[in-house]
Amino acid sequence: MTAEGACVTLPIALTNFAHYTAPLRRFGASSLGRMFVLAIGLAAMTAFTIPELQKSASIWLSACLWCCLGYFAVEAYVRARTAFQAGKARSYLLSASGIVDLAAIVPVPIALACGVAEPTAWLLASLWVLKLAQNSPGFAQLARVFVLEARPLASVLALFLIVLFLSSAAMHVLERDEQPAAFGSLPQSLWWAVVTLTTTGYGDEVPRTHLGHLLGAFVMICGIATFGLWTGILATGFAAESRRRNFIQTWDLVSKVPFFQTLDPSAIAEITHMLRRLEVPARTAVIRRGRVGDCMYFIADGEVEVDVKPTPVRLATGSFFGELALLGDSVRSANVVTTLPSTLLILDLADFRTLTAHHPELARAIDAEGKRRMSENQRLHELQVQSGASPL
């Protein structure tokens, strides 16, 4: 092959390679691909700690771990390059995501370079599990809950410490003569207090005196109450944060719907509380003909197709559908299917009546559009009858 032929063949080969490996590269760049690599890496690290597998499959396990490390290194490089191009290199390096990327790729090579045994060095791959928290909105939301509920949590922590030290001191006084080996010092009594207050109850140190039994029962009850308070604070805070986040997202969607843009902010806030947000993939049935309807839909983003004869109608962002079942006949008169991934806002029947009572102008607009569509459906039905077609 001549040099010119090689120059022509090489780009073609690279193009073909890029074409055929595109699905694999898309999978590797997805969250599912990242989780798959993480699971394989952690499984290989776990297997590396088994002596029998170290002898029989050491090469394969090491190769698998190096491949996973290379994957995380490429992922970190892509993130860093994107941050540098956007002028956010410093914020990326100091962010939790940047620190997690460094923790995933740096410790193992450093440990191997320092002469640490390979099975021991690869234990540092357990830091890869931090990837689960990377770019996860749930963890960010939980962190915000801890910040917002810091004072109540700190108050419960203070209560925990008070009960911990007072109970350990009291148990030391009550049991030190009976069990000097178990309660002869305050640190030993603190260990018992921690185990009992957290309701773990290892049973390695237990009181023998009657007063010690009474104190132990009191400490266990205090432990249940303390952790119940912590759980309640976190659960309430997480629920409130979820509602706040959903409200903001729904508010943004509602404000973009032309049907609601004439309303004042207080009315939009009222409607936002009524609407439910629904993410629907493409080619998914939203409404089926003949079913009883109890809600209507607003299209915040995407597109749907209404299956009416003779020509289906497509509704885009800002439109609404399903109102006919709420205005008159409760039976759905057409199938509605999404043509694109869509974000829908659902208004239930009870909220629909409240909305129309508080905002007559919206009621008139919905009623006018509903009557127009009903008359259109009636006209199409008459045309089908006249042409001899069987009506649906």
Image: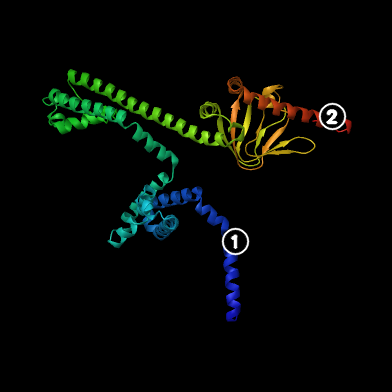
Amino acid type for the residue under numbered disc 2: Glu
User: In x, y percent, where is residue 392?
Assistant: 79, 30
Name the secondary structure under disc 1: helix
Foreground pick, 236 / 244 = 244
Q: Amino acid at mark 1?
A: His
Indicate which disc, 1 or 2, sits on the residue closer to the N terminus.
1
Relative to the observer, which residue lies in front, 168 or 52?
A: 168
Question: How many residues crowd around disc 1 within 10 Å: few (fewer than 14), some, or many (20 or more)?
Answer: few
The residue singled out by tag 2 in the image is 382
> Considering depth in this image, is 275 or 8 the residue closer to the camera?
275
User: Mark 1 and 2 residues: CB-CB less than 8 Å, in contact?
Assistant: no
Residue ranking furthest to the bottom: 2
Q: Which residue sits at x=27%, y=23%?
A: 222
Task: Tell me if residue 292 can be seen.
Answer: no
Residue located 60% across and 65% down the image: 16
Residue 162: where, in percent of width, then height? 21, 26
Q: Which residue is mark 1?
A: 19
Q: Nearer the viewer, residue 329 or 3?
A: 329
